[in-house]
Amino acid sequence: MEVQLGHYLALASIIFGIGAIGFLTRRNVLIQLMSIELMLNSVNLTLLAFNRWASSDHAGQMFAFFVIAVAAAEAAVGLAIVVGFFRLHHTVHTDQANTLKH
Amino acid sequence: MVATYLPLLIMILVAVALALTLFLLAVVLGNKNMTPEKAMPYESGQSTGDARHIRLSLTFFLTAIVFTVFDIEAVFLFAWAAMFRELGWFGLMEMVAFMLILGVTLVYAFRKGAFEWEK
Amino acid sequence: MSPWLALSPLLVVGIGSLTVMMVDAFSNKKDDLSILSSAILIAAAAIAGSLWFGGLPPQTPEILAPYLAVDAMSQFFNITICGGAALCAMLAGGYLREHDLERGDFYSMLMLCAFGAMVLSSATDLVSVFIGLETMSLGVYCLVAFRRGSARAIEGAIKYFLLGSFAAAILLFGSALLYGATGHTDLLGIGQTIRNGNAELGLALVAMSMLVVGLAFKVSAVPFHMWTPDAYEGAITPATAFMSVVVKAAAFAVMLRVLITCFGDPLSAGAASGWPPIIAVVAVVTMIYGNIAAIYQSNIKRMLAYSSIAHAGYILIGVVAAFRVQNTAVSAVLYYLMAYTVSNVLAFGSLIVMGTRGKEAVTFDDLAGAGKRHPMAALPFIIGMLSLMGFPPTAGFFGKYYVFNAALQADSGMHWLVIIAVIASAIGAFYYLRVIVYLFMKDPETGAPQAVAMKSGYVVTALVLSAYFVLEMGITPSNYLKMALAAAAGLV
């Protein structure tokens, strides 16, 4: 059995789904951050798979580079905000974020 | 193709099944009288009591964050290095500009005291 | 035209923000940064203007072409974004000093955000869309968290950050699928492939809905608005003004570009151009929800947050109409965004002026009788509220008028949209007028906290400028509409 485009896409969708479900169900900010990273990495997998099978140029690979770089910047900003949150509440659970009323 | 790997597959399945069975047996048959001592994580007979309250200095996180960003920006250097000859002078100038911007941010982080361990 | 010249507004803001960073790092005087950054931003707006009126190249320089457009529309947004950001920098100059928050990183962050917004509004490639979007968003998350010790600020930032990154991931997955469906990352190439019928239509459709979700989040359309009130309330007021003005304008710019360039052709795409009904439904829900929720707010910033949601709904009507009458509708949206920029800066600026340290106007009750005590500070508040309400002769009135007009021209099926929008804005009048009622017709209860007006040259300058433009755009709207029409012609 040879690995085809469809397999990569299926794997990427599963990873994306795991990330999305993790983001929506967990209340620990760090785990939510990890879930977002998971989603971004599944995008990278999708881009590379399409680049290999469905495209003539290397736009997908280049796109993936930028996604990696931006994901790092996003993680840095996210962690900085989480550190700020932890300083105030001494926890990383978003349930504690309920000062603002709806 | 599939036949070559069949023994491997069977072995994995057996291993997983065995592990699951033993785990479930322990859950079903074992009697559970939980005490606070038992609920504690075991670490070589020593009390782990206050381990999670050890505070890492915030500078540690700050340095880690700065490191992550600067580390990952290096991906563009790899892409440039792979195409170094094709890109020629134009690529070099672009990379110099990129490094200059990174340099400015590094100076900024330095001046703002992001790397001072002792305040 | 050389690529350097074509990129000059972006370069000015980019190098300018690095300069502001260096000044901040090496100088101890912080109060000049407000002047410096607003001067750089105004210079960038002026350069964009002279580029535009000096004659744009018929074709974007080749080296930029797939990634960034140097057309009339991008210059229009450069002017709007830089102008709005400059006004916010002035507001910050007064606000930060008054509230003892003076830190230089606010200005460098604000300029980097403006840079991201400018990239986003002229992006013509999925890669540059993503980079612009993230540059802008990451900066805005930091702006929201600017007041580090405040639980509200951090909470707003953490909600905004988590939901924003989630939406960005969805948008990105949509981009990846669109790349797979068409084999292109540039919007023009994607559009052509779909039009020629060479795209995987099913995949393109899924990609489109993911892109719409991501963009709807950024413009804070219902049901993706949850972050808006919290982030608006948690952020310091100049940052809130910036979010409501610059972020929204850039997000609508990219929404127009993506939807029209990629999925715009009504004849060919069939199922792939199914976005107008989706956006229409989102617009209706957004207008109704935003206006009704705004009525129940006691906090003025939250009220303005829901008002900004409601305005996103009106603008979305213009986006839907762009499907049929592209030029009219796009120019109406552009005019609306410019009008909304100046009106919102005016509203948030008046809110800033209505508060010295410890005596800020937070709720409606704090405003009670403030108009009698400080009539000069209340005047811009009135103009801002009337413009947001859409009362002639202000910018807001013509913004709504042009958008509704475009919708009526577009399709007889869109009449009901306009009717709902008119009803929604009638509901909206209630909470805007409520501000004026509290300012002038209520007396503060004895012992209740009262807002005391502050004095700051920066804030007054920003207020005078934005009030001037609100009235100017309301009295001679045709000049600005002409500008918007010329800009709309740039969108292919």
Image (tube, rainbow, N blue to C red):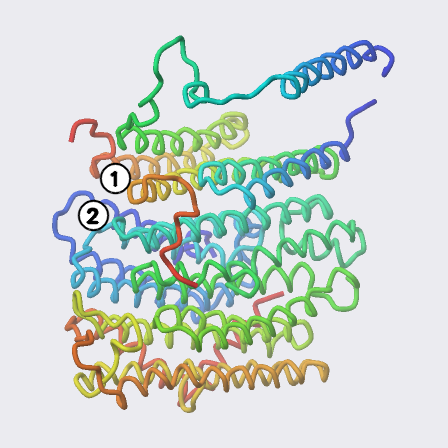
Q: Quadrant of residue B12?
A: top right
How far across and down, in percent of the image, does residue A2 sit? 81, 24
Q: From the viewer's perspective, is residue C444 above or below residue C43?
A: below
Nearest the viewer among C215 and A84 is A84
Between the residue at mark 1 and the residue at mark 2, the CA separation in whole angstroms equals 8 Å
What residue is shown at x 41% (from left), y 12% (from top)?
A: B43
Helix, strand or loop at disc 1? helix
How far across and down, in percent of the image, does residue C422 sit? 56, 86
Residue C42 disc label: none
Mark 1 and mark 2 in contact? Answer it, CB < 8 Å: yes
Q: Quadrant of residue C47?
A: bottom left
| Image side of residue C330 versus residue C103, left or right | right
Question: In which chain is the residue bearing label 2?
Answer: C
| Image side of residue C142 versus residue C164, left or right | left
| Image side of residue C59 versus residue C95, left or right | right
Work out which residue is located at the far left of the displayed protein and give it. C28
Quarter of the image that includes the C terminus of chain C: bottom right
What residue is shown at x 75% (from left), y 49% (from top)?
A: C203
Nearest the viewer among C231 and C209 is C231
Look at mark 2 in the image and give the residue it sits on. C24
Tags 1 and 2 on a common chain: no
What residue is shown at x 63% (from left), y 16% (from top)?
A: B26
Question: In which chain is the residue bearing label 1?
Answer: B
- How many labels were placed on the picture? 2
Q: Quadrant of residue C180?
A: top right
Look at mark 1 in the image and give the residue it sits on. B108
Q: From the viewer's perspective, is residue B52 above or below residue C89?
A: above
How far across and down, in percent of the image, does residue C315 sit? 54, 73
Mark 2 residue type: Asp
What residue is shown at x 54% (from left), y 78% (from top)?
A: C332
Mark 1 residue type: Tyr
